[in-house]
Image (tube, rainbow, N blue to C red):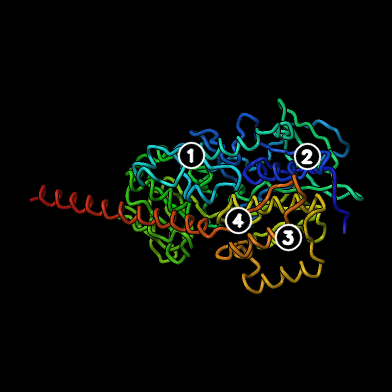
Amino acid sequence: MPKLPVKRVAVIGAGPAGAIAIDALAQEKAFDLIRVFERLMDQELTIMLRIGDTTRPGTLSNFAALADRTADAPLTIPEALPAQTLKSEQPRFAESSVYPYLETNVDGIPMEFSQEPFPTERSERSIAVHGANTPFRHWDVVRRYIQGLVERNGYQDFVSYNTTVERVEKVGAEWKVTLRKEGQGKDYWWAEWFDAVVVASGHYWVPYIPAIDGLEAFEKARPGSVLHSKHFRGRDQFKGKRVVVVGASVSAADIAYDLAHTRTAQTPVHAITIGHAANGYFGDGAFHHPRIQRHPSIARVEGRTVHLVDGQRIPDVDHIIFGTGYSWTLPFLPDVAVRNNRVPELYQHVVWQRDPTLLFVGAVAAGLTFKVFEWQAVYAARLLAGRGTLPPLGEMRAWEEQRIKEKGDGARFSLVFPDFEEYFETLRRLAGEGEDGVGRKLPRFRREWFRAFMEGHELRKEMWRRLNAKAREEEEAEAGGRTKARL
């Protein structure tokens, strides 16, 4: 096993996971160097919440690679560093999934780090829907919250913006981190050396789009006609359009509902949900809107006609929007495999079993997400400072093997729900209290956090029930008016 503690630490990503990792590392007061690499621009520090170009989101290509989860291939590294090369044109999927009126879909309490109060600012839109005490926040409130964490205590000086980590490899006892910064038509490459690396770059970047015959031809004939939910920039671009939304989970529900309830797109909005499992937190209530028509899977696309597996078809389609999730990719870590859309060999979803100087913050599925990041970050920082507990390799492997038996070797492996208390307390025990006067102190898990998390979901489900009922009344009244007009 590599020797701990260490002195030089690299952090990949300055988003929510990276922001709390910076503070956890800094508060240990054990490191000579903390360097943070964020591929977005400083003024866009949007923590994966960058609104980007609201009118022209990126167009999709190479559908075969998106379907088999190989789209985010590593770039070719120059033979000698430092170096300059022509600017790379390869897509890196750095666009965010934010649109102007996006709100959080969980209560602010589960998004609050233990020492940093979450803003109480509420939008007029959210108040109008959920009342004056709405627990949800506009995306920009979250952006400013995370930005404030990064810019306190001089932490912004640790961060190199517009800097993409292209390769992380162990050379002897050190980690060589190869970096690329975009310039005017040029890419500048160099390498830096560290004792440890914390990966906090997130995994909701590379869209997953299932393989469908004729889909790429549909997109080539009308560029921009196929979108992933991360490219959705608001309802206005779909005015009067016939839209098919694919997916049964959160993003597909929000988009289909938005287009149908506001009558922006042609109605009905067609939703591909039948035969697909609804989101475990939110259910499928959004898809029961009277102006949404539910369908089974797509068999193929011919011209502008979408053919379904039950033999039905949807003609004259203008857009197909996929809310089908993302692919885990780690193109900068050639020695770390991604299997079944998860990262194997991570003890407690944090420590790479082969080398505990490579750690992850954020390698989990949704649920109390920001708080999970904090507990993981503190454990990682405490380990690197030589103050945390690292079990023997056999025990770490046994933990993973047991979890595979219980959860499977796929996406559910990384789902902490419903065992939040057990997971938080395990990380708190492994991290320990640290030494006096240094390190973030983790409080005991409070079940009120989980309750607020679940109550937020119920509030949204109640909203869908209420607005769906209102929409049905409107549809019935309009139908009655048309009947009278014919008489």
User: Which element carries disc 2, helix, strand or loop?
Assistant: strand
Q: Position of residue 455 (x, y in %)?
A: 43, 57
User: Which element carries disc 1, helix, strand or loop?
Assistant: loop
Which of the two discs, 1 and 4, sits closer to the camera? 1
Which of the two discs, 1 and 2, sits closer to the camera? 2
User: Which element carries disc 3, helix, strand or loop?
Assistant: helix
In the rendered structure, the answer to whether residue 1 lies left or right of residue 383 reads right
> Disc 1 marks which residue?
99
Which mark is first along the chain, 2 or 1?
2
**Contact (Cβ within 8 Å) of mark 1 with mark 4:** no
**Label annotation for residue 34:** 2
Please name the amino acid that badge 4 sits on: Ala
**Label annotation for residue 139:** none
Which mark is first along the chain, 3 or 1?
1
Q: Position of residue 246 (x, y in %)?
A: 47, 55
Please name the amino acid that badge 1 sits on: Tyr
Please name the amino acid that badge 3 sits on: Leu
Q: Crowdedness of circle 3 by 10 Å Cα count: few (<14), some, many (20+)? A: some
Q: Crowdedness of circle 2 by 10 Å Cα count: few (<14), some, many (20+)? A: many
> Disc 3 marks which residue?
430
Q: Position of residue 248 (x, y in %)?
A: 46, 59
Please name the amino acid that badge 2 sits on: Ile
Quote the CA–CA distance across marks 2 and 3.
23 Å
